[in-house]
Amino acid sequence: MRNAVDIGGGFVITTDNSGGIGMKPADLVEAPDQLTAYFATRVALLEQWAAQAEPISVLIHNFSGPESWQAYEQGVRDAFHEADCDPPPITGSTESNMTLLQSALAVTIIGKRKDVPVTNDVHWFIYGKPLVGNEVLENNQQLASLQLIKEAIDQGLIQQIWPVGSGGIQSEYRNLTGNANCEIQTDVAIHKSAGPATSVLIGVSIDRIKEAQNHFGDFFYEISIG
């Protein structure tokens, strides 16, 4: 698993947060609350899939005020709808006693692990370009699609996924393989932050590489060891 926490009984917890991104005057990046919640949910959902789990509940931690709750909840639903999944029950809490100058949010997902056979005989690819900050809003067609990833998982087209975070592709690949010294080569920036998991490492069975390339289309990049 990547950042998922196994709490026993097959249950796992994943989470992501966002600060200074929203519609408050002091926010560093201006973005609708609904979109901010979508991206936080996106990361936590990808972490669930990386742990071979499916969500059963979502918690919203809202520090932006009561007026942001409805948009945050819709942003959570948007992520699940993009993946063509029914959103699980959504609950959470809002800080209503103190008014913060900047927006702040966390989304936590509780999931149940599936009994899915996993093979290590895979070839790794990058899907989606690493983007951060306003780049995410300006180039959203370059993001890894939740829908295409979920379809590939359900079809058994991909064996493993590993979201890329602020450390960049090179760092995540080293964490994935446990090889702290490996150097990779691919057609995208390997040290750049991928923000809200705009890039995902995808493990494809050797005999299904062509099928995966056709499925994911543009922004699907092969990894080689330098």
Image: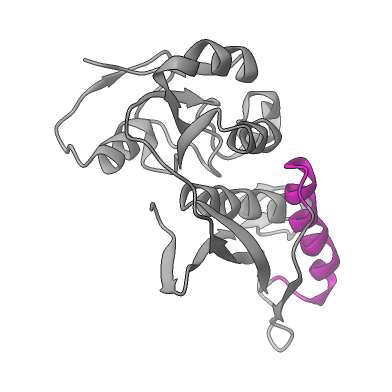
Residue at x 52%, y 41% (from the top left corner): 195
Q: Main secondary structure of the magenta part?
A: helix
Task: Identify the magenta region.
Answer: 64-85
- 138 relative position to 200: left or right: right
Residue 68 part of the magenta-drawn span:
yes
Residue 222 part of the magenta-drawn span:
no
Q: Nearer the viewer, residue 83 or 171?
A: 83
Instruction: Name the spot of residue 88 as percent of width and height, x first.
Output: 74, 64
The reply to whether residue 198 is in sight is yes
- In the rendered image, which quarter is residue 33 located in? bottom right
Residue at x 72%, y 42% (from the top left corner): 83
Colouring of the image: one colour
Instruction: Name the spot of residue 201 as percent of width and height, x first.
Output: 44, 32
- 165 relative position to 83: left or right: left
Outermost residue toward the bottom in this view: 97
Instruction: Name the spot of residue 64 as percent of width and height, x first.
Output: 71, 70
